Image: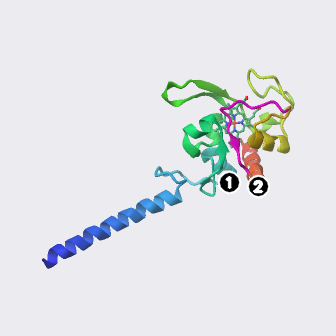
Amino acid sequence: MKNSFYVGVVFIAAGLIGLAAVFVVYSAGTGSLVFRPAAESLGAEIFLYGTAGGRAVPRRGSIGMMGGSRLGCADCHGTDGRGGRVNMMMMMGSFEAPDIRWSTLTSTEMEHTEGETPHPPFDRDSFARALRDGVDPDGGKLESPMPRWGVNDAQVDALIEYLQGL
Ligand code: HEC
């Protein structure tokens, strides 16, 4: 009787430790149970994971929802920021994402978006407008696969710094 009591205690303790471990992994990560390596800067975190300080950056838009709130810029524009063709899950088609390295966005050659009317180069303010309001420097609308991002000024600056390094 006494033995089975101790066995029970051991099992409950093991269960609690297991739960605690899951919770730590969950909260240390970006809210998903899949472990992700920590990003080396705020810009990297937003770019790669779409989170800032572990919290999803608010976004609106069609596909933004498909990948849940965990899509980062890299999921569409590539981890190298050079863009390319993005294939969506479940054969829902594909689309072209532009090169968003800072050197490309600010280049005066103006061939920023494949197949689209060229627009003037980006600067910090028009980049922030592109993210928040979905417009290019001419005021032209960015198509729906590009989400609208609720980024604050510090986050915009961190992203620019990261894109400058690509
Ligand atoms: C779900 C896919 C997706 C995600 C996620 C995404 N983008 Fe985009 N983005 C696009 C597409 C597609 C376009 C092209 C829209 C168009 O041409 O109308 C675009 C356009 C842009 C442009 C305009 C480029 C140009 O040359 O006009 C910028 C800047 C940009 N994205 C930055 C970002 C940043 C920064 C993030 C992360 C915070 C991000 N995007 C996340 C799909 C995405």
Give whichever of 117, 77 is nearer the camera. 117
* Helix, strand or loop status at disc 2: helix
Residue type pointed to by label 1: Leu
| Residue 92 left/right relative to 57 | left
Q: Is residue 150 above or below residue 111?
A: below
Give the residue drawn at x 45%, y 61%.
Answer: 23
Residue 100: image location, x then y, percent: 73, 36
Residue type pointed to by label 2: Ala
Q: Residue furthest left?
A: 1
The colouring scheme, among rainbow, by chain, secondary structure or one colour, is: rainbow
Q: Earlier in the sequence, mark 1 or mark 2?
A: 1
Give the residue drawn at x 52%, y 59%.
Answer: 28
Main SS category, magenta section: loop
Give the residue drawn at x 73%, y 23%.
Answer: 114
Residue designated by label 2: 154
* Magenta region includes residue 89: no
Residue designated by label 1: 42
Residue 37: image location, x then y, percent: 54, 52
Other residues around mark 1 within 10 Å, as few (<14) / some (14–19) / many (≥20)? many
Report the magenta residues as a range: 139-151
